[in-house]
Amino acid sequence: MNTAKWLDGQSRQIVVAAVLAAVAVVPRSTQAFDAPGATIQVTTTQDELVLDGDCSLREAVQAANTDSPVDACPAGSGPDTILLADGLYKLAIPGAGENENQSGDLDLSTDLRIVGSSPAATIVGGAGLDRVFHIYGLVTVELVRMTIQGGNANDGGVYGGGGVLNQGGTLTLDACILKNNRAERTGGGLDNSGNGLLVDTMLQGNQASAGGGIFNDVTIILRSAILLNNHATSTGGGLDNGNTASLTNVTLTGNTAPSGEAIFNDGTLALYNSTLVDNPIKNMGSNGARFLNTLLYNSQGSENCLGDGIYTSEGHNLENWDTCNFKAANDLTNVEPLLDDLQDNGGPTPTFALQLGSPAIDAGDRIDCPDFDQRGAMRPEDGDGDGDPRCDIGAFELGGIFPEPLLMPLLIR
């Protein structure tokens, strides 16, 4: 994929009309970042909490948590922004079971934004010692443009979240990669017990007992994301949802679990313009799973949807079998979608492109169509050349044009 696209993920969410009208960019986050705070530049990749004249990531977090300077890290009286340059920030202090940011994971207990340069260049690693980030309390946290890897939540199974554990906070992951994290119980990549928003983000190769990629028991929204090759030993290889989950322009593929390879749903699930390939859903939720403009393809078995929960079609879905209760007049079942292999098709995350002649082209809902596809290419496009542009089914828009990026610095809000 084009790593340059990570740098303008925020810009690509702005509709062209807003650009032409010179409308100010509206931040994704809440007003928690409106109050003044410090901008803290981390100056060393070492993991330390000592007075030696520099500013480590742990020291920057401590300064933000306490609203007090720590070593060479300043602090403001409001929400702070921590800036990370290129480098590997590897946690090195073994966890001691505390939540004061003294050891193990980085404990975030205040409104805070941590910003890297790109997920290819800014890497925060747990080194297998502990999870990487722990968010607790009613706080707002944004993690932007970084890779979070090598976390290991192995604290006797009390908590999960090998990469990130969100306990009660409002969390945004923007242009991030969570990969190769592990949790003994729940949420190899992310364990969400608060409000979560993931944008332009990839979860890859994470493992847990439940929710290899993500375990959710409050509310989570995924936009323009991919869950790839995550594994659970019990339920939910990609996502284990116990409450409310909404996915738009999301690809799920290669995820594995004994039950619910892509998703195990025991709550309320909505899938819009998403693509699922070779990993079925298991739906046990009484509130069920809803689908719109979504493509499901399983070349390795005869089912895309399992379980005795309610499956509801809102129309314009495509399945290569007939197992998801797609009964709307404009649904397509027992149809081959004609997909290319997963690859870089532009944008920050890999996608399955539609081949010419795919029945998914221009078969989506005319009104309920996102402005962009998973890559950030504009929708709708006249993919079949009949002069009538319509949204394609799934996360990829054939012929979609990328808008010119807005060349502006990240807003420090």
Image: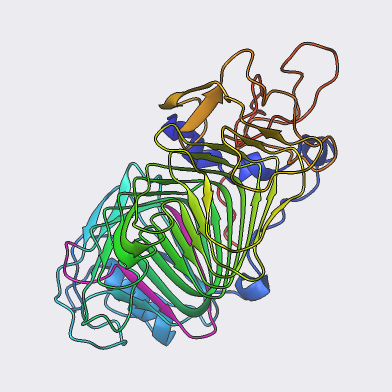
Of the pair 392 and 232, the residue shown nearer to us: 232
Q: Position of residue 83 (x, y in %)?
A: 41, 59
13 relative to 5, above or below = below
Nearest the eye: 411 or 159: 159
* Count of numbered circles in the view: 0
Give residue 184's quadrant in the image. Answer: bottom left
At 72% from the left and 56% from the top, the residue drawn is 26
Quadrant location, the N terminus: top left
- Residue 402, compared with residue 228, is above or below; it is above
Colour mapping used in the image:
rainbow
Question: Can you give x and y, in whole percent of width and height, for residue 386 in the image?
Answer: 82, 12
In this picture, residue 154 sits left or right of residue 166:
left
Q: Which residues are magenta?
A: 127-145
Regarding residue 81, the answer to whether it shows in the image is no
Res. 117 visible in picture: yes
Residue nearest the viewer, comparing 316 with 404: 316
Q: Position of residue 255 (x, y in %)?
A: 38, 48
Q: Residue at x 37, y 79 (%)?
A: 63
Q: Position of residue 148 (x, y in %)?
A: 33, 56
Residue shown at the point (44%, 56%) measured from the top left:
260
- Could you say which is closer to the camera, residue 364 or residue 10? 364
In the picture shown, does residue 127 fall above or below 317? below
Q: Is residue 137 magenta?
A: yes
Q: Is residue 116 left or right of residue 250?
A: left
The quadrant of the image that shows the C terminus is bottom right
Q: Is residue 339 magenta?
A: no
